[in-house]
Image (spheres, rainbow, N blue to C red):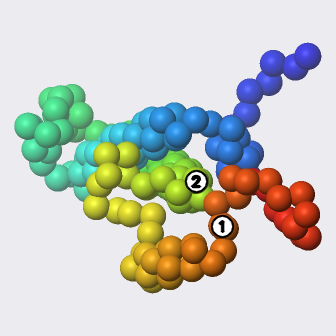
Amino acid sequence: MSAIKRPVQIEEFIVTLREVQDSELYSIKSILNKSISKLYKTNNKLTKLINKEELNSESDESDDELNEIDTNDEQLFKEIVAENEIVVKNQQERIEAIDNELTHRGLPVEENGGTKSTKTSSQTTGDEKLKEKAGVYDTDNDVVDANAPNSVFL
């Protein structure tokens, strides 16, 4: 068996999410958000170095040796910034996939019931209409009716 490791494509990631527990989805999303934050911070620092701007010693943790960069360093920093931007884009796609999976499961997109919700106001009014009709139609699929034509059991 081959032990070759390769990056997981977004399509494979989406399929795999279906098998992941709810709490793990939130955990993966949190890790991705932290990674994106760190990549932005790194890119900001490298861009300042490329542009020969003074670093803010409090947030940038500047080193004296980094204040003077040569042409080779500058080119390397530009390549790193470009690669980081690609990684950020990929990680944002993964966060969007996680949000879609959470929405599909009927869970809030934010773990702690944050401001972002999976339901829009039109969906809420639709839910209220369904509740009104609940007396007429059995929509919860909790009772198996073998005589019902075209029944779908979830």
- Whether residue 47 is visible, yes or no, is no
Earlier-in-chain disc, 2 versus 1: 2
Q: Nearer the viewer, residue 67 or 117?
A: 117
Q: Nearer the viewer, residue 114 or 2?
A: 114
Label 1: which secondary element: loop
User: Residue 66 appears at what percent x and percent y?
Assistant: 23, 34
Q: Which of label 2 and label 1 is nearer to you?
A: 1
Examine the rendered structure and indicate whether residue 147 appears above or below residue 4: below
User: Dot 2 corresponds to which residue?
Assistant: 105
> How would you rate the neighbour count of disc 2 (Cα within 10 Å): few for under 14, some for 14-19, many for 20 or more?
few
Q: Amino acid at mark 1?
A: Thr
Q: Amino acid at mark 2?
A: Arg
User: Residue 69 appears at what percent x and percent y?
Assistant: 28, 39
Q: Which mark is residue 87?
A: none
Name the quadrant of the N terminus.
Answer: top right
In the displayed structure image, the side of residue 2 where residue 83 appears, left or right = left
Q: Residue at x 73, y 47 (%)?
A: 15
User: Dot 1 corresponds to which residue?
Assistant: 139
**Marks 2 and 1 in Cβ contact (< 8 Å):** no
Examine the rendered structure and indicate whether residue 57 appears above or below residue 91: above
Q: Nearer the viewer, residue 153 or 27?
A: 153
Q: Residue at x 83, y 59 (%)?
A: 145
In the displayed structure image, the side of residue 87 where residue 145 appears, left or right = right
Name the quadrant of the C terminus.
Answer: bottom right
Q: Residue at x 50, y 74 (%)?
A: 131
User: Residue 108 appears at what percent x and percent y?
Assistant: 42, 55
In the displayed structure image, the side of residue 111 where residue 101 appears, left or right = right
Examine the rendered structure and indicate whether residue 123 appears above or below residue 112: below
Label 2: which secondary element: helix
